[in-house]
Image: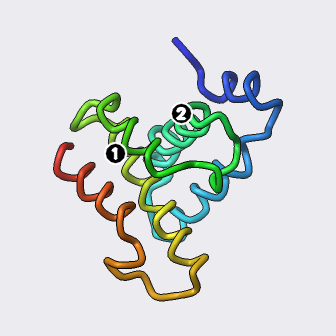
Amino acid sequence: MVRLPQLADLVFGHGAALPAVDEVNTTLVSWRTSAQTIESQVTNATLDLLITCGSPRLEDVPEAQLVQLVPEYPPGTGRRHGLFKVSRVLAHKASSQRHSRPTIATVGPSRRLSILLQANG
């Protein structure tokens, strides 16, 4: 079994991905997401996404990479649910960086990804 925290340490260096994981988890805690969901689903989905993108930084995650990972996360699983949560945080982060209230136009493709994840899982 692959342990993503250890793999991330090997790929990026010890602790390099922790700021990104902490940012996602902190955002979700502020949205009152359960700690169990964060521990069991979101952390692994975040690390999987970062490893797949080849960067320990959320800013370097292209939306296309999220879309590419969707088929690899079976519908109705915790892995898919975790990826959905990560995509929502990334959409929120993108809209916050624009200093505007999120709308369909400003969230755009990231929101469509969230809809895709909900519909298929």
Residue 98 at x, y percent in the picture: 57, 80
Residue at left 51%, top 11%?
1
| Upstream in sequence: badge 1 or badge 2 | 2
Question: For the C terminus, which image quadrant?
Answer: top left
- Quadrant of res 17: top right
Residue type indicated by callout 2: Asp
Tell me: residue 60, above or below residue 98: above
Label 1 crowd (10 A; few <14 / some 14-19 / many >=20): many
In the depicted view, which residue is nearer to us: 75 or 26? 75
Residue type indicated by callout 1: His
Disc 2: which residue: 48
Horizontal side of residue 6 vs 63, given as left or right? right
Element carrying mark 1: helix
Residue 62 at x, y percent in the picture: 53, 49
Residue at left 67%, top 53%?
22
Residue at left 53%, top 38%?
49
- Res 81 label: 1
In the depicted view, which residue is nearer to us: 107 or 13? 107
Label 2 crowd (10 A; few <14 / some 14-19 / many >=20): some
Tell me: residue 118, above or below residue 107: above
Count of marks placed on residues: 2
C-alpha separation, residue under disc 1 versus residue under disc 2: 13 Å
Tell me: residue 8, above or below residue 29: above
Residue 8 at x, y percent in the picture: 68, 29
Tell me: residue 45, above or below residue 60: above
Residue at the farthest bottom position:
100
Question: Of the residues tagged 1 and 2, which is closer to the observer?
Answer: 2
Residue 59 at x, y percent in the picture: 65, 56
